[in-house]
Image (cartoon, rainbow, N blue to C red):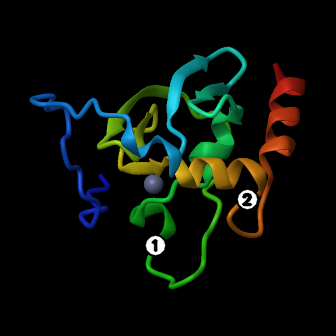
């Protein structure tokens, strides 16, 4: 049983009291307008406010989970945590800057900042498989 990631701040978790609805902050960081899980393909599609469309391999997202449990305590070293066929159970917004992904292996501590998602779409955060590689291998195995 993993109970790490205490350093993550889950501000506003599942509490939607006075949700901020002003649109002032959209110029700095693009935010998702639509998140669509394609479970059979092992893919998560994200549409963004700037019109960009992302397609992520679930294995890629799970592997590069940014939380402290997955990334351990090695300063500056990001590692790929390979789960061969992760299933995504849910995604919920965290504040206005990130989303939390819940995985079938019980892991639900990964807070994926929108900036982080956009960055790792282009290139993996460290030495390891790329999104393109994993999308291709998932397509072959299904
Ligand atoms: Zn993690």
Q: Is residue 137 visible?
A: yes
The disc, 1 or 2, on the residue closer to the chain's N-terminal end is 1
Q: Which residue is mark 1?
A: 72
Q: Position of residue 107 (x, y in %)?
A: 40, 44
Estimate the spatial distance between the alpha carbons at disc 1 and disc 2, rounded to whole Å: 17 Å
SS class, disc 1:
loop
Q: Nearer the viewer, residue 138 or 27?
A: 27
Look at 50% across and 68% down and name the residue there: 71
Farthest residue in the bottom direction?
Answer: 75
Relative to residue 82, is residue 100 depicted above or below?
A: above
| Quadrant observed for ligand 1 in the rendered image | bottom left
Relative to residue 72, is residue 27 depicted above or below?
A: above
Q: Which residue is mark 2?
A: 124
- Which callout, 1 or 2, points to the residue nearer the camera? 2
Q: Quadrant of residue 25?
A: top left
Task: Report whether the residue tagged 1 is closer than 8 Å to ligand 1.
Answer: no
Q: Position of residue 47 (x, y in %)?
A: 61, 26
CB of mark 1 within 8 Å of CB of mark 2? no
Look at 77% across and 57% down and name the residue there: 123
Look at 30% across and 52% down and name the residue there: 1
Q: Position of residue 14 (x, y in %)?
A: 19, 32
SS class, disc 2:
loop
Q: Is residue 107 visible?
A: no
Relative to residue 109, is residue 77 depicted above or below?
A: below
Instruction: Say left or right for 95 vs 128.
Output: left
Instruction: Say left or right for 18 vs 8.
Output: left
């Amino acid at each position: 049983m993993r109970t790490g990631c205490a350093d993550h701040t889950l501000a506003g978790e599942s509490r939607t009291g006075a949700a901020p609805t002003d649109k002032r902050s959209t110029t700095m960081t693009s935010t998702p307008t639509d998140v669509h899980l394609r479970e059979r393909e092992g893919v998560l599609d994200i549409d963004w406010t700037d019109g960009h469309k992302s397609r992520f391999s679930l294995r890629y997202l799970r592997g590069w989970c940014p939380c402290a449990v997955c990334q351990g305590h090695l300063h500056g070293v990001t590692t790929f945590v390979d789960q061969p066929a992760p299933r995504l159970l849910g995604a919920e917004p965290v504040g206005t800057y990130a989303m939390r992904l819940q995985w079938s292996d019980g892991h639900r501590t990964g807070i994926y900042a929108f900036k982080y998602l956009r960055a790792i779409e282009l290139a993996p955060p460290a030495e390891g498989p790329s999104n393109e590689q994993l999308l291709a291998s998932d397509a072959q195995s299904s």
